[in-house]
Amino acid sequence: MRRLILSLVLGSTLSFGACSSSTTNEGPASGGSGGTSTGGTSTGGSGGTSADGGILCPTGKKGPALIAVGPNFCIDATEVTNHDYQKFLADPGDAGTNLTGLSACQGVLDYAPGTTVACPTFAPGVDQNYPVRCVDWCGAYAYCKWAGKRLCGQVGGGAAGQPDASTNQWYSACAGPKAEETYFYGSSHDGGRCVDAPPVAAVGSTLSGGAGCESFLYPGLTDMLGNVAEWEDSCANPQSATSDCGTRGGSALQAGSAVPCAASKTVDRSSQLPGIGFGCCWDSSADK
Protein backbone atom coordinates (compact mmCIF):
# COMPACT_ATOMS: atom_id res chain seq x y z
CA MET A 1 0.00 0.00 0.00
CA ARG A 2 1.20 3.52 -0.66
CA ARG A 3 1.78 6.48 1.60
CA LEU A 4 1.35 10.09 0.53
CA ILE A 5 2.97 12.85 2.53
CA LEU A 6 2.57 16.46 1.47
CA SER A 7 4.51 19.08 3.41
CA LEU A 8 3.43 22.71 3.09
CA VAL A 9 5.46 25.23 5.04
CA LEU A 10 3.04 27.97 6.02
CA GLY A 11 3.99 28.23 9.63
CA SER A 12 2.97 24.59 10.21
CA THR A 13 3.30 21.19 8.58
CA LEU A 14 0.22 19.37 7.29
CA SER A 15 0.11 15.60 6.92
CA PHE A 16 -2.02 13.51 4.57
CA GLY A 17 -2.78 9.97 5.60
CA ALA A 18 -2.70 7.07 3.18
CA CYS A 19 -0.21 4.79 4.81
CA SER A 20 1.86 1.86 3.70
CA SER A 21 0.97 -1.54 5.07
CA SER A 22 3.84 -1.30 7.56
CA THR A 23 2.90 2.20 8.78
CA THR A 24 1.07 2.68 12.04
CA ASN A 25 -0.59 5.59 13.78
CA GLU A 26 1.62 5.30 16.80
CA GLY A 27 3.63 8.26 17.98
CA PRO A 28 3.13 11.49 19.90
CA ALA A 29 0.50 13.93 18.80
CA SER A 30 1.87 17.25 17.62
CA GLY A 31 -1.22 19.39 18.11
CA GLY A 32 -4.19 19.93 20.35
CA SER A 33 -7.34 17.88 20.56
CA GLY A 34 -8.50 18.90 17.11
CA GLY A 35 -5.23 18.86 15.17
CA THR A 36 -4.69 20.55 11.83
CA SER A 37 -5.17 18.93 8.44
CA THR A 38 -6.89 19.08 5.09
CA GLY A 39 -6.29 15.49 4.11
CA GLY A 40 -8.23 13.39 6.58
CA THR A 41 -5.56 12.65 9.19
CA SER A 42 -5.30 14.89 12.21
CA THR A 43 -1.97 15.91 13.69
CA GLY A 44 -3.64 16.06 17.08
CA GLY A 45 -4.68 13.28 19.40
CA SER A 46 -8.47 13.37 19.37
CA GLY A 47 -9.61 14.11 15.85
CA GLY A 48 -11.65 17.09 14.75
CA THR A 49 -13.24 18.58 11.65
CA SER A 50 -11.48 19.73 8.49
CA ALA A 51 -12.21 22.90 6.53
CA ASP A 52 -14.41 20.94 4.12
CA GLY A 53 -16.46 19.38 6.92
CA GLY A 54 -14.76 15.97 6.89
CA ILE A 55 -13.53 14.21 9.98
CA LEU A 56 -9.87 14.45 10.97
CA CYS A 57 -8.49 11.08 12.06
CA PRO A 58 -6.31 11.26 15.18
CA THR A 59 -2.73 10.10 15.13
CA GLY A 60 -1.14 8.44 18.14
CA LYS A 61 -3.65 5.59 18.23
CA LYS A 62 -2.17 2.10 18.34
CA GLY A 63 -2.16 -0.24 15.34
CA PRO A 64 -2.81 0.60 11.69
CA ALA A 65 -3.14 4.23 10.64
CA LEU A 66 -6.66 5.57 10.28
CA ILE A 67 -8.40 6.59 7.05
CA ALA A 68 -11.27 9.11 7.09
CA VAL A 69 -14.63 7.84 5.86
CA GLY A 70 -16.90 10.78 5.11
CA PRO A 71 -17.70 13.23 7.90
CA ASN A 72 -18.43 10.74 10.67
CA PHE A 73 -15.67 8.23 11.40
CA CYS A 74 -12.29 6.72 10.56
CA ILE A 75 -11.27 3.12 9.91
CA ASP A 76 -7.98 1.20 10.05
CA ALA A 77 -6.18 1.36 6.70
CA THR A 78 -5.47 -2.38 6.88
CA GLU A 79 -6.46 -5.36 8.95
CA VAL A 80 -4.76 -5.57 12.35
CA THR A 81 -1.50 -7.47 11.88
CA ASN A 82 0.30 -10.10 13.93
CA HIS A 83 2.81 -7.43 14.92
CA ASP A 84 0.04 -5.11 16.13
CA TYR A 85 -1.62 -7.85 18.14
CA GLN A 86 1.66 -8.99 19.72
CA LYS A 87 2.09 -5.48 21.12
CA PHE A 88 -1.35 -5.74 22.70
CA LEU A 89 -0.65 -9.10 24.32
CA ALA A 90 2.73 -7.88 25.60
CA ASP A 91 1.17 -4.95 27.45
CA PRO A 92 -2.62 -5.22 27.57
CA GLY A 93 -3.09 -3.12 30.69
CA ASP A 94 -4.99 -4.95 33.44
CA ALA A 95 -3.85 -8.46 32.52
CA GLY A 96 -6.06 -11.26 33.76
CA THR A 97 -9.20 -9.12 33.72
CA ASN A 98 -12.09 -8.63 31.33
CA LEU A 99 -10.63 -5.87 29.17
CA THR A 100 -13.81 -5.44 27.15
CA GLY A 101 -16.03 -4.42 30.05
CA LEU A 102 -18.81 -6.51 28.47
CA SER A 103 -20.76 -9.13 30.41
CA ALA A 104 -20.73 -11.43 27.37
CA CYS A 105 -16.90 -11.53 27.56
CA GLN A 106 -16.52 -11.83 31.33
CA GLY A 107 -15.24 -15.40 31.03
CA VAL A 108 -12.57 -14.48 28.49
CA LEU A 109 -9.36 -13.46 30.23
CA ASP A 110 -6.85 -14.81 27.71
CA TYR A 111 -6.84 -13.02 24.36
CA ALA A 112 -4.16 -15.09 22.63
CA PRO A 113 -5.09 -16.43 19.18
CA GLY A 114 -6.23 -20.05 18.90
CA THR A 115 -3.68 -22.80 18.44
CA THR A 116 -5.64 -25.47 16.59
CA VAL A 117 -3.95 -27.22 13.69
CA ALA A 118 -5.74 -24.94 11.20
CA CYS A 119 -4.44 -21.77 12.84
CA PRO A 120 -1.11 -20.27 11.71
CA THR A 121 1.88 -19.96 14.01
CA PHE A 122 1.58 -16.82 16.11
CA ALA A 123 5.01 -15.85 17.42
CA PRO A 124 7.40 -12.87 17.37
CA GLY A 125 9.15 -12.62 14.02
CA VAL A 126 6.67 -14.81 12.17
CA ASP A 127 4.55 -13.22 9.40
CA GLN A 128 4.58 -9.89 11.15
CA ASN A 129 2.81 -8.03 8.34
CA TYR A 130 0.07 -10.64 7.91
CA PRO A 131 -3.40 -10.15 9.39
CA VAL A 132 -3.78 -11.68 12.83
CA ARG A 133 -6.17 -14.65 12.67
CA CYS A 134 -7.86 -17.11 15.00
CA VAL A 135 -8.80 -14.28 17.39
CA ASP A 136 -12.29 -14.55 18.86
CA TRP A 137 -14.78 -11.66 18.93
CA CYS A 138 -13.94 -10.69 22.52
CA GLY A 139 -10.24 -10.53 21.67
CA ALA A 140 -10.96 -8.27 18.69
CA TYR A 141 -13.17 -6.00 20.82
CA ALA A 142 -10.54 -5.84 23.60
CA TYR A 143 -7.75 -4.99 21.16
CA CYS A 144 -9.69 -2.14 19.55
CA LYS A 145 -10.55 -0.70 22.96
CA TRP A 146 -6.88 -0.96 24.04
CA ALA A 147 -5.82 0.79 20.82
CA GLY A 148 -8.05 3.78 21.59
CA LYS A 149 -10.52 2.78 18.87
CA ARG A 150 -13.53 0.49 18.76
CA LEU A 151 -14.66 -2.58 16.88
CA CYS A 152 -16.56 -1.25 13.87
CA GLY A 153 -20.28 -1.06 14.55
CA GLN A 154 -22.95 1.63 14.30
CA VAL A 155 -22.09 5.07 12.93
CA GLY A 156 -22.12 7.34 15.96
CA GLY A 157 -21.45 4.58 18.50
CA GLY A 158 -22.72 1.23 19.70
CA ALA A 159 -23.44 -2.03 17.94
CA ALA A 160 -24.50 -2.10 14.31
CA GLY A 161 -28.12 -2.85 13.55
CA GLN A 162 -29.46 -3.58 10.09
CA PRO A 163 -26.87 -3.75 7.29
CA ASP A 164 -27.54 -0.21 6.08
CA ALA A 165 -24.55 1.57 4.52
CA SER A 166 -25.65 4.87 6.02
CA THR A 167 -25.50 3.52 9.58
CA ASN A 168 -23.08 0.54 9.52
CA GLN A 169 -19.43 1.64 9.71
CA TRP A 170 -17.85 -1.34 7.97
CA TYR A 171 -20.43 -1.41 5.16
CA SER A 172 -20.17 2.35 4.65
CA ALA A 173 -16.37 2.17 4.39
CA CYS A 174 -16.61 -0.66 1.86
CA ALA A 175 -19.47 0.54 -0.36
CA GLY A 176 -19.86 4.22 0.48
CA PRO A 177 -22.53 5.82 2.70
CA LYS A 178 -25.18 5.39 -0.01
CA ALA A 179 -23.93 1.94 -1.08
CA GLU A 180 -22.50 3.53 -4.23
CA GLU A 181 -20.19 0.59 -4.96
CA THR A 182 -21.04 -3.12 -5.04
CA TYR A 183 -17.43 -4.05 -4.42
CA PHE A 184 -14.74 -2.27 -2.48
CA TYR A 185 -12.97 -1.12 -5.64
CA GLY A 186 -15.92 -0.49 -7.99
CA SER A 187 -19.22 -1.75 -9.35
CA SER A 188 -18.10 -5.13 -10.72
CA HIS A 189 -16.02 -8.04 -9.45
CA ASP A 190 -12.35 -8.02 -10.48
CA GLY A 191 -10.96 -11.48 -9.75
CA GLY A 192 -7.45 -11.43 -8.30
CA ARG A 193 -7.48 -7.78 -7.42
CA CYS A 194 -7.97 -8.75 -3.79
CA VAL A 195 -6.73 -11.96 -2.17
CA ASP A 196 -9.80 -14.07 -2.92
CA ALA A 197 -8.08 -17.46 -3.14
CA PRO A 198 -5.68 -19.27 -0.77
CA PRO A 199 -3.32 -18.64 0.87
CA VAL A 200 -3.89 -15.66 3.14
CA ALA A 201 -1.28 -13.00 2.32
CA ALA A 202 0.37 -9.96 3.88
CA VAL A 203 -1.84 -6.89 4.25
CA GLY A 204 -2.05 -4.81 1.10
CA SER A 205 -1.43 -7.81 -1.18
CA THR A 206 -3.11 -8.67 -4.50
CA LEU A 207 -3.29 -11.92 -6.43
CA SER A 208 -3.00 -10.37 -9.87
CA GLY A 209 -0.15 -7.98 -9.15
CA GLY A 210 -2.25 -5.20 -10.65
CA ALA A 211 -4.06 -2.24 -9.14
CA GLY A 212 -4.33 -3.80 -5.71
CA CYS A 213 -7.15 -4.20 -3.23
CA GLU A 214 -7.61 -0.50 -2.54
CA SER A 215 -10.79 1.49 -2.06
CA PHE A 216 -12.26 3.35 -5.02
CA LEU A 217 -13.81 5.91 -2.68
CA TYR A 218 -11.22 6.23 0.09
CA PRO A 219 -7.64 5.98 -1.24
CA GLY A 220 -5.28 4.31 1.19
CA LEU A 221 -7.94 1.96 2.57
CA THR A 222 -7.18 -1.64 1.63
CA ASP A 223 -8.13 -5.29 2.17
CA MET A 224 -11.79 -4.96 3.05
CA LEU A 225 -12.70 -7.78 0.69
CA GLY A 226 -10.89 -11.12 0.64
CA ASN A 227 -7.78 -12.22 2.56
CA VAL A 228 -9.56 -12.58 5.92
CA ALA A 229 -13.11 -11.78 6.97
CA GLU A 230 -13.44 -9.17 9.72
CA TRP A 231 -15.39 -9.24 12.94
CA GLU A 232 -17.80 -6.35 13.54
CA ASP A 233 -19.75 -5.17 16.56
CA SER A 234 -23.02 -6.75 15.51
CA CYS A 235 -24.23 -9.64 17.68
CA ALA A 236 -27.65 -11.28 17.81
CA ASN A 237 -27.63 -11.43 21.61
CA PRO A 238 -25.24 -8.85 23.11
CA GLN A 239 -25.42 -10.48 26.56
CA SER A 240 -24.63 -14.05 25.44
CA ALA A 241 -21.11 -15.48 25.45
CA THR A 242 -22.08 -17.79 22.59
CA SER A 243 -24.10 -15.34 20.51
CA ASP A 244 -23.63 -15.26 16.76
CA CYS A 245 -21.80 -12.09 15.69
CA GLY A 246 -21.26 -10.57 12.28
CA THR A 247 -18.24 -10.93 10.02
CA ARG A 248 -17.78 -9.11 6.74
CA GLY A 249 -15.57 -9.10 3.66
CA GLY A 250 -15.16 -12.81 3.02
CA SER A 251 -11.96 -14.84 3.28
CA ALA A 252 -9.45 -16.25 0.84
CA LEU A 253 -10.08 -19.58 2.56
CA GLN A 254 -13.79 -19.80 1.78
CA ALA A 255 -15.24 -21.04 -1.47
CA GLY A 256 -16.80 -18.42 -3.71
CA SER A 257 -15.06 -15.54 -1.96
CA ALA A 258 -16.11 -12.94 -4.55
CA VAL A 259 -18.08 -11.32 -1.73
CA PRO A 260 -19.77 -7.95 -2.27
CA CYS A 261 -19.74 -5.26 0.41
CA ALA A 262 -23.35 -5.96 1.40
CA ALA A 263 -22.69 -9.60 2.35
CA SER A 264 -22.26 -10.67 5.96
CA LYS A 265 -21.90 -13.97 7.77
CA THR A 266 -22.58 -14.70 11.43
CA VAL A 267 -20.28 -16.84 13.57
CA ASP A 268 -20.30 -17.80 17.27
CA ARG A 269 -18.38 -15.03 19.04
CA SER A 270 -16.13 -17.56 20.80
CA SER A 271 -14.88 -18.95 17.46
CA GLN A 272 -11.16 -18.75 16.67
CA LEU A 273 -11.01 -19.39 12.94
CA PRO A 274 -8.15 -19.09 10.42
CA GLY A 275 -10.32 -17.15 8.00
CA ILE A 276 -11.33 -14.38 10.43
CA GLY A 277 -9.36 -11.33 11.51
CA PHE A 278 -10.49 -7.77 12.19
CA GLY A 279 -9.85 -4.05 11.89
CA CYS A 280 -10.97 -1.17 14.10
CA CYS A 281 -12.88 2.06 13.66
CA TRP A 282 -12.66 5.40 15.44
CA ASP A 283 -15.10 8.21 16.15
CA SER A 284 -15.64 10.43 19.16
CA SER A 285 -17.48 7.63 20.99
CA ALA A 286 -14.23 5.62 21.14
CA ASP A 287 -12.67 8.27 23.40
CA LYS A 288 -15.48 8.18 25.98
Image (tube, helix red, strand yellow):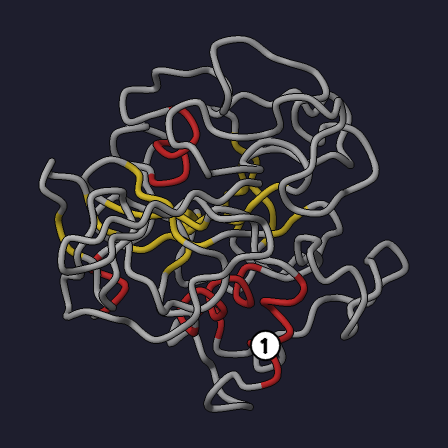
Q: Quick one: SS at disc 1?
A: helix
> Where does the image place residue 238, in percent across and percent down from the top left?
39, 57
Q: Position of residue 201 (x, y in %)?
A: 75, 43
Q: Quadrant of residue 239?
A: bottom left
Q: Which residue is mark 1?
A: 87
Residue 49 point in image, percent of width and height: 12, 49
- Please state the total of marks drawn on the protein image: 1
Q: Position of residue 281 (x, y in %)?
A: 37, 52
Residue 224 vs residue 8, the one in the foreground: 8
Q: Nearer the viewer, residue 73 or 47?
A: 47
Residue at the spot x=48%, y=15% of the render? 186
On the image, which quarter does residue 178 sit in? Answer: top left
Query: Residue drawn at (54%, 8%), measured in percent from left and top?
Result: 188
Q: Is residue 71 left or right of residue 195?
A: left
| Figure quadrant of the N terminus | top right
In the picture, measured across the screen, residue 213 lies left or right of residue 121, that is left
Q: Is residue 86 left or right of residue 160?
A: right
Q: Residue at x 48, y 10 (%)?
A: 187
